[in-house]
Image: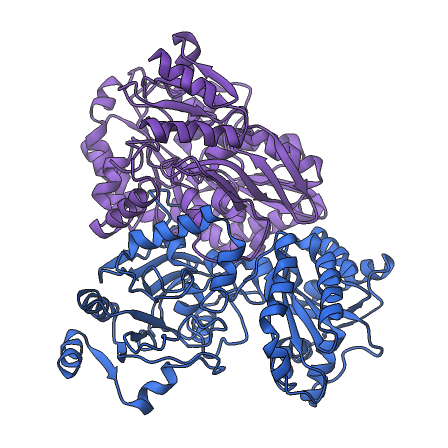
Chain colours: A purple, B blue
């Protein structure tokens, strides 16, 4: 053991951690749902050091568990219980290597915190749109490994659509330099997109070329009351036809969600005078001037009133007011966390079928698990819902968690019938691995296994994640 | 031979061609650059029939050469000279299976002509943006197999970015149903993007779910004179900052190109009074009204005049005028074809480096191959140039074609030093296969080979294309 550790230590420049206190934070996810053991935790200094560590692991048959900011929700960055793995933390690869505003690209290392990436873009007069709740601690490498979504996908796409090139350490410990800053390149297989979303099971992303966008002059938000998800969908269609790419967010919030946020965040105020069963948060972005964006948003809401889709709305008239409206949306998860344990589903369906899906899934849950509260919100413009459950008020949720498997099955069977996805933006990790295998065809699982076997024949890269 | 043919004929529903007259059009590319032989040409009726044909080929060890509209420029759809292959023409799979305007998607079969896909979208009040010169005869399956680009990539992306899901026949003859109409789905490896751009070497695309966009109210074009590519780039940056997603095309045209078009298309008129070494064709799209789009475009050009980037400009004031400006751009290739043989390069570089690239490549060609004319145009907003050569006036170009290898090497070595791509939108086929192997790293070629071996271990899918 000691000889092996010395050998590993000699292989790279960076930190090697073995003490229980030092390694503990890397051996569990931030919610404490999964817990594992590791032979060691390494934090290499450079991509070359990552390559050296992975080469050592390949030589010695040691499993590798890549880890970014450790903010995942599916257990994809936690080692298993065997203690055989090395946890490979990318957090010391945190340089912004370059920003090229004329090419609208930046080259960043995998361990860069997402917020730092956003800031570096802003410093160069550009906008990096990827945005999600964990942005203060998640890393761009983790965002790419899980193809993260967030609140700007409607306009700018997932992490995948924001990436032009990658640098990757292969399972054999070789460094692939695919750091291209090109809009068009048709010279062979799309290796970039194969590594994106593979959750570290095919290799380790060490750096990426990300796309930048022009910095908008203003982002204006409104909170609007709608009677049903079906009305919200009609308003979405209206918004897309009128606003096109100026529509940058279209989020759905149930009254239950709003109630939880107002209860647990007393600094936040109800956005409208009267409650409504459902709300949408709409954001319009304007490149040139705030007034034009606000006028476009107000025009949409007026059309929504006229079409009897919107019964009331509040349009932010300042950045602070926009942020306050966004806070109502962004704090739902945390508010839900104060109401006992949770059962979460990160699902997507074709957009026009969301109304039917919500009705059917809510009815089925009400029939079979009537006590639990349904906490439904999400990225309506992407067809992506966080279809969550909380226990009855005052209940800690232990009983509900005991029913989790049956609840998941009920919800995901409906998702499947609606031609949807059981993991829209959180990845499979270990959480959804077996369920994905149930809903996917044998042909698709076979193709995935063939790719895994081809690139990682030893099966050392993040074993047990994505595929069993 | 006859017994084998009977066996194949019995395996599927559709046409089987063996007579020399019938098969001839499938055995050469439309330009007549490549020519091959085939055991048979098959045109199956359905995806299940494609699967049956490919299964038969897998069983009998018969190579398969998938073919769409046969409009490629890299020889990717022509069989080799051995006569062992079956040419698998997808043209009978030409149904638009469904259009879902509320989900902004359509499901189309691989053999649908691109123009038909555009029309079906328009009939549903939506816009399908993929557009290129061959759209009247190329197929959507071929567009996806080669990740086609065209004139709308700046705003809407390549074929890859327009696709949400695929149906594919694997090299083993199994049918993978990945026809998802979801904006977000993170449940495993990105098989879709692996098949897109693989030029039929990993499987056969039989259908796809494509993204639709809101139908714009107006598209307004302008033709502007600029002194240098560097000034064109500055105007591009100005356009992106002012117009964002309303900027839908930004094409570069040299005066040589314009001269060839005006010479060979006498119905077209010079767009400006005085000639200029370079021009840009700029297009602005507006969702709501033409006047707003025209005002935005005029505002950009005024800013360009003030910044001394633009010396003269013509803004189209009608659809007919816009089409006339586009005709000056779209007929360059055909005009060049009337001036003897051509040597073409479909290259891309990071956008801010285009000016330097053009200067260096033109100087090197002028020094080493001084007689030939340089015919340079392309999608400046994507960093993609068609950096072509024509022989001196009156010369048929045979001598130049004899120097082709040296010319390619000279141009592509410069592309490589500029961190560019030697095939931006035309794919590798057989034309660029060996050159790609020279410029790519052994690690990348190794990864590509591993993927090929994993999915097509018999090596029967479009052999000799992409990889040697």
Residue under the image location 47 percent in, 67 percent down: B125
Task: Name the spot of residue B107 as percent of width and height, x first.
Answer: 36, 64
Vertical position of residue B458 compared to residue A292: above or below: below
Q: Residue at x 42, y 70 (%)?
A: B76
- Name the residue at 65% across, 30% down: A320
Regarding residue B285, the answer to whether it shows in the image is no
Image position of B64 with respect to A102: above or below: below
Q: Foreground: A385 or B58?
A: B58
Residue B196 image-quadrant placement: bottom left
Looking at the image, which is closer to me, B88 or B135?
A: B88
Confirm whether residue B166 shows in the render: yes
Question: Which residue is at a point 32% across and 21% down the rendered structure image?
Answer: A34
Q: Quadrant of residue B209?
A: bottom left
Percent x, y for residue A120?
Answer: 65, 34
Q: Is residue A195 left or right of residue A44?
A: left
Residue A440's x, y, as percent?
Answer: 24, 47
Residue B34 lies left or right of residue B234; in this view the side is left
Which quarter of the rendering shows the C terminus of chain B?
A: bottom left
**Taking B202 as reference, is A414 left or right?**
left
Q: Please state if A430 lies on the left or on the right of B3 as rendered.
A: right
């Amino acid at each position: 053991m000691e000889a092996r550790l010395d050998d590993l230590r000699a292989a790279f420049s960076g930190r090697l951690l073995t003490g229980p206190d030092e390694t503990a934070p890397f051996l569990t996810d931030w919610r404490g749902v999964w817990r594992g053991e590791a032979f060691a935790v390494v934090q290499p200094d450079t991509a070359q050091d990552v390559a050296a560590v992975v080469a050592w692991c390949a030589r010695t048959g040691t499993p590798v568990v890549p880890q970014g900011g450790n903010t995942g929700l599916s257990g994809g960055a936690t080692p298993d219980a065997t203690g055989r793995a090395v946890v490979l933390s990318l957090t010391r690869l945190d340089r912004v290597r370059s920003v090229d505003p004329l090419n609208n690209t930046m080259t960043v290392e995998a361990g860069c915190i997402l917020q730092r990436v956003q800031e570096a873009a802003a410093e160069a007069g550009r906008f990096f749109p990827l945005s999600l709740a964990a942005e203060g601690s998640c890393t761009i490498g983790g965002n790419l490994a899980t193809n993260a979504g967030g609140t700007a996908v409607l306009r700018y796409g997932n992490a995948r659509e924001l990436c032009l090139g990658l640098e990757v350490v292969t399972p054999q410990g070789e460094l692939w330099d695919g750091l291209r800053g090109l809009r068009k390149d048709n010279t062979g297989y799309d290796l970039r997109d194969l590594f994106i979303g593979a959750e570290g099971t095919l290799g380790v992303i060490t750096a990426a070329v990300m796309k930048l966008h022009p910095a908008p002059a203003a982002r204006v938000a409104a909170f609007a009351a709608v009677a049903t998800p079906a009305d919200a969908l009609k308003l979405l269609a209206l918004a897309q036809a009128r606003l096109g790419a100026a529509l940058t967010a279209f989020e759905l919030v149930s009254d239950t969600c709003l109630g939880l946020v107002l209860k647990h965040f007393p600094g936040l105020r109800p956005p409208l005078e009267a409650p409504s069963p459902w709300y949408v948060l709409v954001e319009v972005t304007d490149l040139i001037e705030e007034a034009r964006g606000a006028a476009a948003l107000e025009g949409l809401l007026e059309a929504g009133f006229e079409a009897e889709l919107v019964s009331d709305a509040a349009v932010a008239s300042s950045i602070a007011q926009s942020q306050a409206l966004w806070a109502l949306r962004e704090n739902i998860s945390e508010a839900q966390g104060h109401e006992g344990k949770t059962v979460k589903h990160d699902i997507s369906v074709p957009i026009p079928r969301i109304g039917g899906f919500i009705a059917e899934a809510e009815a089925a849950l009400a029939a079979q698990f009537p006590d639990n509260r349904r906490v439904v919100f999400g990225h309506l413009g992407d067809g992506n819902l966080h279809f969550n459950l909380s226990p009855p008020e005052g209940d800690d949720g232990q009983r509900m968690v005991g029913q989790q498997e049956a609840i998941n099955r009920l919800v995901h069977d409906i998702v499947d019938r609606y031609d949807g996805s059981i993991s829209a933006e959180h990845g499979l990790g270990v959480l959804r691995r077996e369920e994905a295998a149930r809903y996917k065809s044998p042909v698709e699982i076979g193709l995935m296994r063939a790719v895994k076997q081809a690139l990682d024949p030893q099966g050392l890269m993040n074993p047990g994640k994505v595929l069993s």
